[in-house]
Image (cartoon, rainbow, N blue to C red):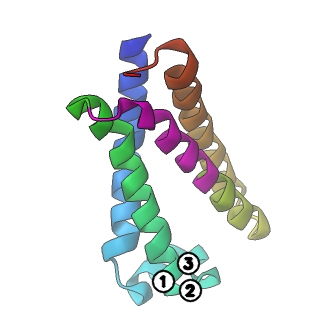
Amino acid sequence: MNTVLWVMQIILALLFLMAGGMKVVTPYAQFIQKMPWGKDLQPRTIKAVGVLEVLGALGLVLPGLLNILPTLIPYAAAGLAVTMIGAAWLHVRRKERQQVVVNFVLMAVALLICVGRFVLVPLGG
């Protein structure tokens, strides 16, 4: 089970690192051309979400790899799950059903990691 959780953590971390990194480094005008939903948000909000996603991604992996406060991993997963609730709400309002499904899948994986690291196979502590 520990291996399964690590695989999920790494995959989810890579996805959020890429998505969050794109939000942080891409200029707003270029971003909304690729992601039309960005028009519904202020540029600084998109940057802030990107920073949170990058930090969440790092929080899924680094504490366990470095063995420094590995008990933070489920909290990072919970934070990313909350982020996906906000993303799903944005896409529901825009009637972007396919994106809502993606948000719920990512949220489900984050919640599995959260439960797995809190209850099934906790690290550290």
How many numbered discs sit on the rendered protein? 3
Q: CA distance from mark 1 to mark 3?
A: 11 Å
Label annotation for residue 118: none
- Mark 1 or 3, which is nearer the eye? 1
Q: CA distance from mark 3 to mark 2?
A: 8 Å
Magenta span: 68-83
Instruction: Give SS at disc 3.
Output: helix
57 within the magenta span:
no
- Which residue ends up furthest to the front in the rendered image? 125
5 displayed left or right of 114 = left
Instruction: Give SS at disc 2.
Output: loop
Per the image, the residue denoted by label 3 is: 38
Q: Residue 83, position in %: x, y?
A: 59, 55
- Which residue ends up furthest to the left in the rendered image? 66
Q: Kindly indicate whether the residue at mark 1 contacts the one at mark 2 (C-beta within 8 angstroms).
A: yes
Q: Residue 67, position in %: x, y?
A: 25, 29
Instruction: Give SS at disc 1.
Output: helix
- Mark 3 or 2, which is nearer the eye? 2
- Which residue ends up furthest to the top in the rendered image? 1
The amino acid on which the numbered mark 1 sits, given as a three-letter code, is Arg
Q: What residue appears at the point 39 percent right and 14 percent down from the top-left corner?
A: 2
Q: What residue appears at the point 43 percent right and 89 percent down from the top-left corner?
A: 29
Q: Nearer the viewer, residue 44 or 59?
A: 59
Q: What residue appears at the point 43 percent right and 50 percent down from the top-left corner?
A: 56
* Label 3, residues with CA under 10 Å away: few <14, some 14-19, many ≥20: some
Label annotation for residue 42: 2
Q: Residue 26, position in %: x, y?
A: 34, 78
Q: CA distance from mark 2 to mark 1?
A: 5 Å
15 over 117 or under it: above or below: below
Per the image, the residue denoted by label 1 is: 44
Q: Residue 23, position in %: x, y?
A: 40, 70
Q: Nearer the viewer, residue 64 or 26?
A: 64
